Amino acid sequence: MLLFLRRRSDLLLLLGLLLGSASAWAQHPAGRLAPKPLYRDPVYDGAADPVLIWNKKAKKWWMFYTNRRATDTTAAGVTWVHGTRIGIAESGDGGATWTYRDTANINYRPQPGYTFWAPDVVEDKGTYHMFLTYVPGTFTDWNHPRTIVHLTSPDLVNWQYVSTLPLATDKVIDASVFRLPNGTWRLWYNNERDHKSTYYADSPDLRTWTDHGPALPDRGEGPKVFRWQGQYWLIIDPWKGLGAYHSTDLLHWTAQPTHLLEAPGRGPDDQAIGGHADVVVSGDRAYLFYFTHPGRGAAHPAPPNSIAAKRSVIQVVELHYQNGQLTCDRDEPTYMQLKAGR
Protein backbone atom coordinates (compact mmCIF):
# COMPACT_ATOMS: atom_id res chain seq x y z
CA MET A 1 0.00 0.00 0.00
CA LEU A 2 2.85 2.38 0.74
CA LEU A 3 3.78 2.33 -2.94
CA PHE A 4 0.69 4.43 -3.61
CA LEU A 5 1.44 7.03 -0.95
CA ARG A 6 3.06 9.64 -3.15
CA ARG A 7 2.89 12.53 -0.69
CA ARG A 8 3.70 12.98 2.98
CA SER A 9 0.10 14.05 3.55
CA ASP A 10 -1.13 10.69 2.17
CA LEU A 11 0.92 8.84 4.76
CA LEU A 12 -0.22 11.14 7.55
CA LEU A 13 -3.87 10.71 6.56
CA LEU A 14 -3.50 6.92 6.50
CA LEU A 15 -1.88 6.92 9.93
CA GLY A 16 -4.68 9.11 11.27
CA LEU A 17 -7.33 6.73 9.93
CA LEU A 18 -5.53 3.71 11.38
CA LEU A 19 -5.34 5.31 14.79
CA GLY A 20 -9.12 5.83 14.81
CA SER A 21 -11.22 8.23 16.83
CA ALA A 22 -9.18 7.70 19.99
CA SER A 23 -6.37 9.62 18.32
CA ALA A 24 -8.30 12.84 18.94
CA TRP A 25 -6.97 12.61 22.51
CA ALA A 26 -3.41 11.68 21.58
CA GLN A 27 -0.68 13.74 23.19
CA HIS A 28 1.70 15.55 20.88
CA PRO A 29 4.18 18.41 21.41
CA ALA A 30 1.81 20.71 19.48
CA GLY A 31 -1.30 19.62 21.41
CA ARG A 32 -4.15 17.23 20.75
CA LEU A 33 -5.23 15.96 17.38
CA ALA A 34 -8.40 17.70 16.19
CA PRO A 35 -11.02 15.33 14.76
CA LYS A 36 -12.76 15.62 11.40
CA PRO A 37 -15.21 17.15 11.42
CA LEU A 38 -14.15 19.40 14.27
CA TYR A 39 -17.73 20.21 15.28
CA ARG A 40 -21.34 19.44 14.34
CA ASP A 41 -24.30 21.38 15.71
CA PRO A 42 -26.57 18.95 17.63
CA VAL A 43 -29.73 21.03 17.11
CA TYR A 44 -29.99 21.58 13.33
CA ASP A 45 -26.69 20.15 12.00
CA GLY A 46 -26.02 23.43 10.24
CA ALA A 47 -23.00 25.06 11.92
CA ALA A 48 -21.41 27.76 9.73
CA ASP A 49 -19.51 31.08 9.89
CA PRO A 50 -17.41 30.31 13.01
CA VAL A 51 -15.64 32.88 15.17
CA LEU A 52 -13.58 32.08 18.28
CA ILE A 53 -12.82 34.05 21.42
CA TRP A 54 -11.21 33.29 24.78
CA ASN A 55 -13.73 33.33 27.64
CA LYS A 56 -11.76 34.91 30.47
CA LYS A 57 -14.13 33.84 33.25
CA ALA A 58 -14.66 30.25 32.12
CA LYS A 59 -11.02 29.94 30.99
CA LYS A 60 -12.16 28.14 27.86
CA TRP A 61 -12.30 28.87 24.17
CA TRP A 62 -15.79 29.67 22.89
CA MET A 63 -16.99 29.39 19.33
CA PHE A 64 -19.93 31.42 18.02
CA TYR A 65 -21.54 30.30 14.77
CA THR A 66 -24.58 30.73 12.55
CA ASN A 67 -26.97 27.93 13.49
CA ARG A 68 -28.52 27.14 10.08
CA ARG A 69 -31.69 25.03 10.22
CA ALA A 70 -30.46 22.31 7.88
CA THR A 71 -32.72 19.56 9.24
CA ASP A 72 -35.95 21.61 9.15
CA THR A 73 -37.98 19.65 6.57
CA THR A 74 -40.78 22.25 6.59
CA ALA A 75 -38.54 25.11 5.39
CA ALA A 76 -39.51 26.61 2.01
CA GLY A 77 -37.05 28.32 -0.32
CA VAL A 78 -34.13 29.65 1.70
CA THR A 79 -36.02 30.01 4.97
CA TRP A 80 -33.70 27.37 6.43
CA VAL A 81 -30.85 29.89 6.38
CA HIS A 82 -33.16 32.55 7.84
CA GLY A 83 -34.72 32.49 11.28
CA THR A 84 -31.31 31.41 12.52
CA ARG A 85 -29.83 31.91 15.96
CA ILE A 86 -26.19 32.12 17.04
CA GLY A 87 -24.92 28.87 18.53
CA ILE A 88 -22.19 28.59 21.13
CA ALA A 89 -19.73 25.72 21.55
CA GLU A 90 -16.86 25.54 24.03
CA SER A 91 -13.49 23.87 24.25
CA GLY A 92 -11.52 23.10 27.39
CA ASP A 93 -8.56 21.52 25.61
CA GLY A 94 -7.16 24.36 23.55
CA GLY A 95 -9.56 24.08 20.62
CA ALA A 96 -9.09 20.41 19.74
CA THR A 97 -12.58 19.23 20.76
CA TRP A 98 -15.84 21.12 21.16
CA THR A 99 -19.17 20.64 22.92
CA TYR A 100 -22.45 22.46 22.36
CA ARG A 101 -23.35 24.93 25.08
CA ASP A 102 -26.37 27.04 24.07
CA THR A 103 -27.52 29.81 21.78
CA ALA A 104 -26.55 33.39 22.53
CA ASN A 105 -29.23 35.40 24.34
CA ILE A 106 -29.38 38.40 22.00
CA ASN A 107 -31.84 41.02 23.23
CA TYR A 108 -32.49 42.60 19.85
CA ARG A 109 -35.62 41.27 18.16
CA PRO A 110 -37.53 44.20 16.66
CA GLN A 111 -39.25 42.09 13.98
CA PRO A 112 -40.95 38.68 14.20
CA GLY A 113 -39.03 35.82 12.67
CA TYR A 114 -35.75 37.71 13.07
CA THR A 115 -32.54 36.28 11.61
CA PHE A 116 -29.00 36.41 13.02
CA TRP A 117 -25.97 35.70 10.83
CA ALA A 118 -22.18 35.63 11.02
CA PRO A 119 -21.08 37.34 14.25
CA ASP A 120 -17.65 38.70 15.01
CA VAL A 121 -16.70 39.06 18.67
CA VAL A 122 -13.89 41.05 20.29
CA GLU A 123 -13.05 42.00 23.88
CA ASP A 124 -12.03 45.49 25.02
CA LYS A 125 -11.47 46.65 28.60
CA GLY A 126 -13.44 43.80 30.10
CA THR A 127 -16.47 44.12 27.81
CA TYR A 128 -17.26 41.79 24.92
CA HIS A 129 -18.49 43.36 21.69
CA MET A 130 -20.42 41.49 19.01
CA PHE A 131 -20.95 42.79 15.48
CA LEU A 132 -23.81 40.79 14.05
CA THR A 133 -25.66 40.64 10.74
CA TYR A 134 -29.37 41.22 11.37
CA VAL A 135 -32.12 40.36 8.86
CA PRO A 136 -35.63 41.63 9.74
CA GLY A 137 -37.54 38.37 9.25
CA THR A 138 -37.52 34.84 7.90
CA PHE A 139 -37.69 34.98 4.11
CA THR A 140 -37.97 32.54 1.19
CA ASP A 141 -35.50 34.52 -0.95
CA TRP A 142 -32.48 36.83 -0.63
CA ASN A 143 -34.22 40.09 -1.65
CA HIS A 144 -34.44 41.77 1.74
CA PRO A 145 -32.38 44.31 3.71
CA ARG A 146 -29.74 43.37 6.24
CA THR A 147 -27.74 45.48 8.64
CA ILE A 148 -24.83 45.06 11.04
CA VAL A 149 -25.68 45.73 14.69
CA HIS A 150 -23.41 46.31 17.68
CA LEU A 151 -24.10 44.40 20.92
CA THR A 152 -22.21 44.21 24.20
CA SER A 153 -21.98 41.59 26.93
CA PRO A 154 -20.21 41.08 30.28
CA ASP A 155 -20.30 37.28 30.00
CA LEU A 156 -20.54 36.25 26.31
CA VAL A 157 -24.03 34.83 26.93
CA ASN A 158 -26.37 37.80 27.39
CA TRP A 159 -26.12 40.52 24.75
CA GLN A 160 -27.61 44.02 24.76
CA TYR A 161 -28.19 46.14 21.68
CA VAL A 162 -26.05 49.28 21.35
CA SER A 163 -26.58 50.54 17.79
CA THR A 164 -27.04 49.78 14.12
CA LEU A 165 -23.88 50.75 12.26
CA PRO A 166 -24.18 53.59 9.67
CA LEU A 167 -22.64 51.68 6.76
CA ALA A 168 -22.73 52.21 3.00
CA THR A 169 -26.01 50.50 2.08
CA ASP A 170 -28.99 48.62 3.49
CA LYS A 171 -27.63 45.21 2.43
CA VAL A 172 -24.44 44.57 4.41
CA ILE A 173 -23.25 41.35 6.04
CA ASP A 174 -20.26 39.62 7.67
CA ALA A 175 -18.37 41.97 9.98
CA SER A 176 -14.67 41.50 10.78
CA VAL A 177 -13.27 43.79 13.48
CA PHE A 178 -9.55 44.38 14.09
CA ARG A 179 -7.63 46.71 16.40
CA LEU A 180 -5.28 48.99 14.46
CA PRO A 181 -1.71 49.66 15.63
CA ASN A 182 -2.75 53.08 16.99
CA GLY A 183 -5.40 51.51 19.26
CA THR A 184 -8.43 52.43 17.17
CA TRP A 185 -10.62 49.89 15.37
CA ARG A 186 -11.43 48.96 11.80
CA LEU A 187 -14.40 46.93 10.55
CA TRP A 188 -14.50 45.18 7.18
CA TYR A 189 -17.81 43.95 5.76
CA ASN A 190 -19.47 42.67 2.61
CA ASN A 191 -21.49 45.21 0.62
CA GLU A 192 -24.04 43.14 -1.27
CA ARG A 193 -25.23 46.10 -3.34
CA ASP A 194 -21.75 46.68 -4.78
CA HIS A 195 -21.10 43.30 -6.42
CA LYS A 196 -20.52 41.73 -2.99
CA SER A 197 -17.22 43.56 -2.58
CA THR A 198 -15.51 44.40 0.73
CA TYR A 199 -15.94 47.81 2.37
CA TYR A 200 -14.54 49.19 5.62
CA ALA A 201 -15.31 51.61 8.46
CA ASP A 202 -13.24 53.05 11.33
CA SER A 203 -13.98 53.75 14.99
CA PRO A 204 -12.00 55.26 17.87
CA ASP A 205 -13.96 53.29 20.49
CA LEU A 206 -16.09 50.52 18.87
CA ARG A 207 -19.16 52.73 19.23
CA THR A 208 -18.83 55.61 16.77
CA TRP A 209 -18.21 54.50 13.18
CA THR A 210 -17.24 56.29 9.97
CA ASP A 211 -17.65 54.42 6.70
CA HIS A 212 -14.79 54.84 4.20
CA GLY A 213 -16.17 52.86 1.28
CA PRO A 214 -14.42 50.18 -0.80
CA ALA A 215 -11.51 48.20 0.62
CA LEU A 216 -11.33 45.38 -1.94
CA PRO A 217 -13.23 45.19 -5.25
CA ASP A 218 -13.11 41.41 -5.56
CA ARG A 219 -16.34 39.49 -5.05
CA GLY A 220 -16.51 37.43 -1.87
CA GLU A 221 -18.18 37.14 1.53
CA GLY A 222 -16.92 36.69 5.08
CA PRO A 223 -13.85 38.96 5.25
CA LYS A 224 -11.40 38.08 8.01
CA VAL A 225 -8.37 40.21 8.90
CA PHE A 226 -5.45 39.10 11.08
CA ARG A 227 -1.72 39.69 11.54
CA TRP A 228 0.82 36.91 11.12
CA GLN A 229 4.35 36.45 9.78
CA GLY A 230 5.09 40.17 9.97
CA GLN A 231 2.21 41.36 7.79
CA TYR A 232 -1.55 41.68 7.63
CA TRP A 233 -3.82 39.19 5.91
CA LEU A 234 -7.36 39.40 4.56
CA ILE A 235 -9.29 36.24 3.71
CA ILE A 236 -12.59 36.27 1.81
CA ASP A 237 -14.96 33.56 0.66
CA PRO A 238 -15.69 33.74 -3.12
CA TRP A 239 -17.37 30.25 -3.05
CA LYS A 240 -14.41 28.55 -4.70
CA GLY A 241 -12.17 28.12 -1.73
CA LEU A 242 -10.83 31.11 0.17
CA GLY A 243 -9.08 34.08 -1.40
CA ALA A 244 -6.05 35.37 0.53
CA TYR A 245 -4.52 38.87 0.38
CA HIS A 246 -1.62 40.47 2.21
CA SER A 247 -0.86 44.07 3.18
CA THR A 248 1.64 46.15 5.11
CA ASP A 249 -0.75 49.03 5.86
CA LEU A 250 -4.27 47.51 6.10
CA LEU A 251 -5.34 49.64 3.12
CA HIS A 252 -3.65 48.21 0.04
CA TRP A 253 -4.14 44.49 -0.51
CA THR A 254 -2.25 42.13 -2.83
CA ALA A 255 -3.89 38.84 -3.81
CA GLN A 256 -1.95 35.61 -3.73
CA PRO A 257 -2.47 33.53 -6.90
CA THR A 258 -3.84 30.40 -5.24
CA HIS A 259 -6.96 29.86 -3.15
CA LEU A 260 -7.03 28.02 0.15
CA LEU A 261 -9.35 25.01 0.56
CA GLU A 262 -10.40 24.96 -3.10
CA ALA A 263 -9.37 21.35 -3.67
CA PRO A 264 -11.45 18.83 -1.71
CA GLY A 265 -10.00 17.00 1.24
CA ARG A 266 -10.24 13.27 1.87
CA GLY A 267 -11.23 13.30 5.53
CA PRO A 268 -14.77 12.85 6.89
CA ASP A 269 -17.12 15.69 5.87
CA ASP A 270 -14.19 17.56 4.29
CA GLN A 271 -14.63 16.70 0.61
CA ALA A 272 -16.12 20.04 -0.46
CA ILE A 273 -14.74 23.57 -0.68
CA GLY A 274 -14.07 25.43 2.56
CA GLY A 275 -16.12 28.55 3.33
CA HIS A 276 -16.42 31.63 5.61
CA ALA A 277 -13.49 31.21 7.98
CA ASP A 278 -11.97 32.54 11.17
CA VAL A 279 -8.24 32.54 11.93
CA VAL A 280 -6.75 32.21 15.39
CA VAL A 281 -3.08 33.13 15.77
CA SER A 282 -1.57 31.37 18.79
CA GLY A 283 2.08 32.08 19.43
CA ASP A 284 3.88 31.50 16.14
CA ARG A 285 1.16 29.20 14.77
CA ALA A 286 -2.08 30.06 13.00
CA TYR A 287 -5.24 27.98 12.59
CA LEU A 288 -7.99 28.33 10.00
CA PHE A 289 -11.49 27.43 11.20
CA TYR A 290 -13.89 27.00 8.29
CA PHE A 291 -17.13 25.28 7.37
CA THR A 292 -18.05 22.83 4.64
CA HIS A 293 -21.25 21.52 3.12
CA PRO A 294 -20.26 17.82 3.02
CA GLY A 295 -23.13 16.98 0.67
CA ARG A 296 -21.97 19.46 -1.95
CA GLY A 297 -18.71 17.82 -2.89
CA ALA A 298 -18.22 17.71 -6.65
CA ALA A 299 -17.48 13.98 -6.67
CA HIS A 300 -20.69 12.82 -4.98
CA PRO A 301 -23.21 15.69 -4.69
CA ALA A 302 -26.36 15.11 -2.68
CA PRO A 303 -29.78 15.87 -4.23
CA PRO A 304 -30.56 19.62 -4.24
CA ASN A 305 -32.55 20.84 -1.23
CA SER A 306 -31.95 17.58 0.63
CA ILE A 307 -30.83 17.60 4.25
CA ALA A 308 -27.53 16.10 3.08
CA ALA A 309 -27.01 19.09 0.76
CA LYS A 310 -27.92 21.63 3.44
CA ARG A 311 -26.04 20.34 6.48
CA SER A 312 -22.72 21.99 7.33
CA VAL A 313 -19.90 21.34 9.76
CA ILE A 314 -16.91 23.16 11.21
CA GLN A 315 -13.39 22.01 10.31
CA VAL A 316 -9.91 23.27 11.22
CA VAL A 317 -6.50 23.20 9.54
CA GLU A 318 -3.15 24.72 10.46
CA LEU A 319 -1.92 27.51 8.20
CA HIS A 320 1.65 27.59 6.90
CA TYR A 321 3.71 30.36 5.35
CA GLN A 322 5.77 29.41 2.32
CA ASN A 323 7.43 31.68 -0.23
CA GLY A 324 5.38 34.68 0.83
CA GLN A 325 2.03 32.87 0.63
CA LEU A 326 -0.44 31.23 2.98
CA THR A 327 -0.82 27.50 2.46
CA CYS A 328 -2.59 24.64 4.21
CA ASP A 329 -3.02 20.91 3.76
CA ARG A 330 -6.46 19.90 4.98
CA ASP A 331 -5.45 16.21 4.91
CA GLU A 332 -2.53 16.76 7.26
CA PRO A 333 -3.39 16.00 10.92
CA THR A 334 -3.97 19.23 12.88
CA TYR A 335 -2.63 19.28 16.45
CA MET A 336 -3.91 22.08 18.63
CA GLN A 337 -3.25 23.77 21.94
CA LEU A 338 -4.49 27.34 21.58
CA LYS A 339 -2.98 29.70 24.12
CA ALA A 340 -5.27 31.64 26.44
CA GLY A 341 -6.43 35.01 25.24
CA ARG A 342 -7.44 36.78 22.08
Image (tube, helix red, strand yellow):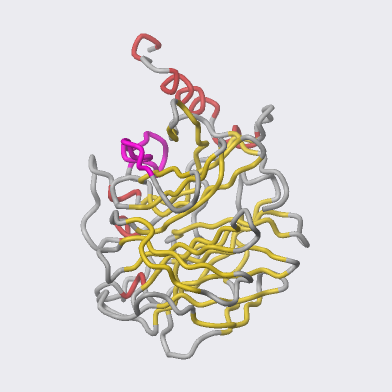
Rendered view: 73 above or below 63: below
Find residue 162 and report its horizontal and vertical position in percent: 59, 82
Report whether 137 appears left or right of 20: left
> In terms of image quadrants, where is residue 196?
bottom left
Where the N terminus falls, by quadrant?
A: top left
Vertical order, 210 against 11 (above or below): below
Q: What x and y, as percent, mark residue 314?
A: 47, 51
Q: x, y percentage for residue 35?
A: 54, 40
Q: Relative to the observer, which residue lies in front, 299 or 110?
A: 110
Relative placement, left or right, of 158 versus 241 is right
What residue span does the magenta drawing correspond to?
Answer: 254-271
Name the residue: 37% across, 78% down. 146
Q: Residue at x 67, y 34 (%)?
A: 31
The count of marks equals 0
Q: Which quadrant of the figure has residue 163?
A: bottom right
Image coords of residue 182 (percent x, y): 64, 57
Residue at 66%, 77% in the rendered image? 158
Residue at image location 43% in from the left, 33% down from the top: 325
For the residue pair 149 and 303, the one nearer the viewer reads as 149
Secondary structure, magenta segment, majority class: loop
Towards the viewer: 215 or 6: 215
In the depicted structure, whether residue 317 falls above or below residue 251: above
Q: Is residue 261 magenta?
A: yes
Please say whether residue 230 is one of the residues in the magenta stretch. no
